[in-house]
Amino acid sequence: MAIYTIVPLHLGDITRPRSNMIYGYGGEEMQDFPLIAYYLEGEHKILVDTGGSAPESAQGQKAAPYKRLPGQELNAALGSIGVSADDIEYVVFTHLHWDHAGNNHIFDKAKFFCQKIEYDSLIDPECEKIGYDMDYVLGFDYELIDGDVELFGGISVILAPGHTRGMQCVAVETGAGIVVLTGDLVTLRASLEYEPPRFNALLYNDSAASLAQTSLNKVLSKSELVLPGHDADVFTPGMGLHPI
């Protein structure tokens, strides 16, 4: 079995209510939350998500408050760990929202993977498109995955709808065991301190909570070692399992 290392990349910050991030959370405080891509290195060089559109872009301005320092641009973040965009063989998208699929254009050589239901929902006129930069994200070709699939030795995806129809998590074989990159199924590790564990409060429709809970139960049955989608703790050694 292939063993991978995982490195989180900090690609800017959005300011949002904490209640957006944890289902059922009652507080009203605002907080900065990082945009994150995960670099995986083992048999292949893989990126999970590509971060947000530029803050000065139309989508970036629409998403304000949103800030990104020059060193947090994806090319710069990759360069800081000795990797270039051309080194990336595969990009696996947890989902195609603007803050997870906003820098696809820098990858000329990589193959893109997303769930078929995620892509199909974008071309379905009956599905709402909140959170997507439609003009941008549909300008790329994707290899469409149907459900839970092993992509390569050591790398599998888990269909986990709730936040979006085609949300998927990425299970990675590491020296510490299986680590699951949850995307926006779990945005903060604090969600897992509840009983039962909670998921992202932002769901694709009002009836998706039970679906999200089922997704979370399925993911946690694979591993309780998780790296969430918007948690600054992933950049702290030990707290974020970084580096593995």
Image (cartoon, rainbow, N blue to C red):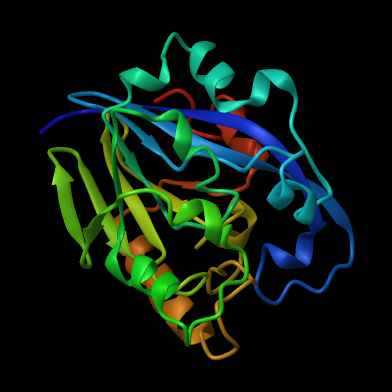
Q: Which residue appears at 14% of the width and 40% of the height?
A: 152
Q: Which residue appears at 49% of the width and 82% of the height?
A: 127
Quarter the C terminus occupies: top left
- Residue 67 rendering spot, x and y as whole percentages: 79, 37
| Side (left or right) of 102 relative to 54 | left
Of the pair 8 and 122, the residue shown nearer to us:
122
Q: Which residue appears at 71% of the width and 20% of the height?
A: 70
Position above or below: 22 against 38 = below
Quarter the N terminus occupies: top left
- Residue 196 rendering spot, x and y as whole percentages: 53, 74
- Residue 19 rendering spot, x and y as whole percentages: 76, 67
Q: Which residue appears at 41% of the width and 80% of the height?
A: 124
In the figure, residue 199 lies in which quadrant? bottom right
Determine the residue located farthest toward the bottom in the rendered image.
Answer: 207
| Side (left or right) of 54 relative to 153 | right
Of the pair 29 and 34, the residue shown nearer to us:
34
- Residue 30 rendering spot, x and y as whole percentages: 87, 55
Position above or below: 243 against 227 = above
Determine the residue located farthest toward the top in the rendered image.
Answer: 82
Position above or below: 193 against 231 = below
